[in-house]
Image (tube, rainbow, N blue to C red):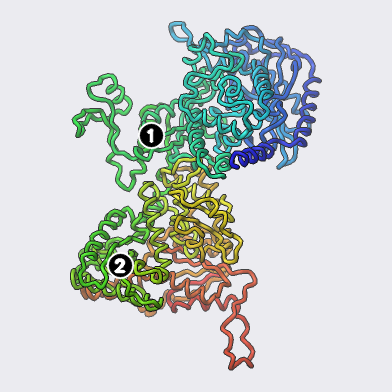
Amino acid sequence: MGVAYDASLAREVVNECTTSANVRRVVAHAIEGVTRALGEMKEKEFKSKPVSWFVIESEDVMGKTLKFAPPTRAYVIGSHADGGCFNVSMHGDDLAVVDVAVEMPRSFFHEKDYLDHRYHFKRALYLETLHNKLSKSSEWSVDMNDQYADPRKPYISLHFGEKGDRKTIRLFPTVDAETFASVRLLPDRANLRSLESKSGERRPSPHYNQSIAEDMYGELHAQYFAAASKKAANLTGAVVLFKRWAQGRRLLGAPDGVNGFFISMLLAYMLEQGGQISSNMDASQMLRAALGALAKPNFFKKGLYCNGKPAEANAWQRAFSQVFLGPCGHVNIMSRMSESAVKELIHEASVSTEELKKSSSSVFGNVLLGSFPAAVRYDLHLHVTAHVADLESDSDINARRDSEIAASKVISRALGDRAKLVRVHEIPKTSVDDLGSSACTLWVGIVLDPENAMRLVDIGPSSADDKEAKDFRAFWGDRSELRQFKDGRICESVVWDFVPPSQRHHIPAIVAEQALERNMTACERVEWSAKLFDEPMSKITSSKEGASPANLLQALDRLAKRMKDLKEMPLKVNNVQPLSGAFRGTDPFPPTPHPLAHGAGVGLGKSEDDIPVCPKTLDILIQLEGSGRWPEDPTSIEKTRAMMAIELAESLRKSYAMPSIVSEESVDILFEGYAFRVHISAATGGAHVKATEEQLLERAAHAGLIASIAARFPMFGVSTQLINRWIASHMFSPHISDEAIEALVATLFVTPGSALPPMSREVTFVRFLNLIASHLWHDPVVLDPENVVNEAEVERINRTAKGAPAMCIVTPHDRSGSQLTLAAPNVVVLKRLVVIATRATLEVQGLLDGTSKHSLADEDAWEKFFKPSLSGFQAAFILRRSALPFPKQALFPSKRLYKRMREHFESEMSVVDEDDEETLAQSIKLAKLPPKLLQRGPDKAREALLIGFDPMSCFLKDAQDRLGGTALLFADKYGGDTVGVAFKPGAVHADAQFPESLSWLPNPSPAARDAVIEELATISGNDFVAKVLS
């Protein structure tokens, strides 16, 4: 079943990714026109002169008279030559890109034109003549581009067709294989005068030599692939699948990376020589086999040779980091591929291979069709500005590629086993002003190792190894120091303990930055992504002393011990389980020790901080021992549980002088500065008791599941805090619960797909946005760390049933997928969330990969994706900040949004008169306890606490009850003082109907929208809402 499904999916993808016959006919007709235009050109003599768009000149050719002759022939090359073309865009918005080889006549060149760029300059002159001819036609537009971003290798692009249906023909100048003696282009030959040393000896020019050989043997490569595809009918389809897989990971297109030609030749080699794939495989099996072969780290180590290992193999290995010799024996197909690009290919193949080993039927489709751009694959992103001083004619390798190689080597050495992968390539120029610039910006992507990335000490060689120690000190300079370790070793080392604990995630970036500044002379500036979200996270209290999950759990353990030791309880306490997100590190604002939440009479020590009126609670589950004496009636069971909670609080007060606060809704125990809210569970008392605790037990199971995931993945907690902030900042707090956010983020770590679990806040954030934006929400999201939920159970979920949640999250303890999202979000809210996440995804990805106009160094770069959108709101309430418990937590208080709100809304109404000092003096203030109350002592001050009180949620509940489902309310629960109102189109705001005794009277007319808004402004009192905009 699985194999057949994969083969069927592969056929569909091949058909979809292959250019249609109609498009190929249109392109073929255009190629005929181009060939005809080239054939009409006449022989002529001209004097060579500089070409404006070509940066290299040859003194040996300049000023000489050359004889132009029309191309010997023009023929289609690449995938179109085999009857199909990969139509997933790799070249902008073009629907189809067809490559055509234009063979220049051998008579145009001299036998020694392979020296000192003579060939390249003549090639440019010939191309200029073709360009002038083709530019006269109105059938297409013409421009010049550099192949592989190499100024030595320009080509002509012809564009035709309307926007959205544009097609491109690329004309690549080539020469006959006999134009130059092949022995002169071997990798150990020196053909550049500029590489001559003072002693008169020239260094070899392997990359320069290859740039000429590439033009000579293209037809032989095409014949090799054609012969292989005749042996295996599915080879062409496998090439398309491999390209689709590579394009999903954005591996295609980089000048030093994977391209379609390499993929075609690699699969042909695997069929003809390597033996990794066979002719009786279908396309999906060929893809699996190819990825499995590439996943082996040593696949390229000894080189690949299409016609057997030649006598010059050692010379090829010395000249290039990777060798893949084509069938001609003179072209290294991987000569332009950097070591970091090859490692990236191997890494991605390895991750995909591991994913394909899973038994799920959807795995192959996810690996093949999944979108994994660099922003979601790399944990750390650096943008390195480097100065490129060398002229292209002075060096063997492209100067920009040389900078990439240098940066890659320095960073890889500096990070060592902190990184699993380092990838470096130049960020493409997007501005005309950047073209021809002597500076290039390099993008660096780093996949971090979870065990070593954040360590404080890099241990170098032993002091006894003089050579290695000297090299280490030369690399690190004054950062290196000699240290003796506990095991007695004395080694060179670099210590990073100056980085504060709250910024330990900066360490890999700091290591790379300092290494580049010390060892790469061309390096001018380094920017990195690790501090991108430092500003929105700076207000988060979880990193402060006393608020960490470890400290909270330790306090709970001490409280639990006291509870279990109580003798007066009717039923013994068996276990205490944490429920709140603060215990597992996902709450951005866990409670900090409150001076009044200690023992009786304790508190009110000296502190410059404001004392909160409404301290947050920590929910805990108290599991009691079993008993057969529980009542049968659910109401009686609930009352008995409440009595048990009160008895527990009273026993703690008597035994340990531990204060507690009992209210109608809850029992809160004050211990070591925290308010622990008690939830009693007596599930062991029988099935009838357990049935009344369904929601509580569901919450406990969720807490245990998330806690185990947080323990496995060090970045889970802090990443969830960030995403909680983003959800709240966009005012979705009333619609998406903390538990639902935790579950969604957890899937990114537990089932990362064809990628590794994230190791940074920024990559988790962009993966979350990508999940929200791209997931088909008709399908459930499955969080299943232990693989206990089978596919059949998920498929049986009826997503079209009445009342089915818009967002379905399946977990091991909730196979229906409705517990976390049954009440919200609804379809409208989910669509709004998807739209906002889609926009933010593009913005964050652009910022990380360097294509955005913003810089990673911009302190306010994060605001672009956190600033709330006002679109869709017909009204907004601005709340009085002093009436909110924690107004300082807000990222975007109404003052920062006020200008945009005045532009968005037409009218403004003040509810509270800011000049009425008497009213303001009597209004409730929840941000801090008043000084006068504190002077009356800790016990009196403790009585004034409103533990766990959230006026925002109360206002939202009252408003929703009044609206009766005719509008949606949006708010930020983390200090936000703005409530957005989105009315449903055509909704009628009916008041209460008259009772039957007065049915003879006509019912009142529905209230107008403005009247409802005014009523809502005072629904929670006259001083909670400050202003109304509509």
**Image spot of residue 738 (x, y percent):** 43, 60
Position of the C terminus, as image quadrant, is bottom right
Q: Of residues 831 and 474, which is closer to you in this image?
A: 831
Q: Does 788 sit left or right of 465 as displayed?
A: right
Q: CA distance from mark 1 to mark 2?
A: 54 Å
For the point 44% across and 62% down, the residue is 893
| Label whose residue precedes the other's in the sequence (1 or 2) | 1
Q: Does 834 sit left or right of 566 as displayed?
A: right
Q: Are marks 1 and 2 in contact (CB under 8 Å)?
A: no
Q: Please identify, in this view, whether the residue under mark 1 or under mark 2 is nearer the observer.
A: 2
Can residue 6 be spotted in the picture? yes
Residue 760 to residue 479: above or below: below
**Label 2 crowding class (10 Å Cα cut-off): few <14, some 14-19, many 20+?**
many
Position of the N terminus, as image quadrant, is top right
For the point 53% across and 25% down, the residue is 337
Can residue 849 be spotted in the picture? no
**Label 1 crowding class (10 Å Cα cut-off): few <14, some 14-19, many 20+?**
many
**Image spot of residue 423 (x, y percent):** 47, 32
Mark 2 residue type: Leu
For the point 43% across and 66% down, the residue is 695
Q: Of residues 371 and 38, which is closer to you in this image?
A: 371
Dot 2 falls on a residue whose secondary structure is: strand
Identify residue for label 2. 624
**Image spot of residue 538 (x, y percent):** 37, 53
Mark 1 residue type: Ala
Name which quarter of the figure residue 806 lies in: bottom right
Identify residue for label 1. 512
Residue 843 to residue 675: above or below: above
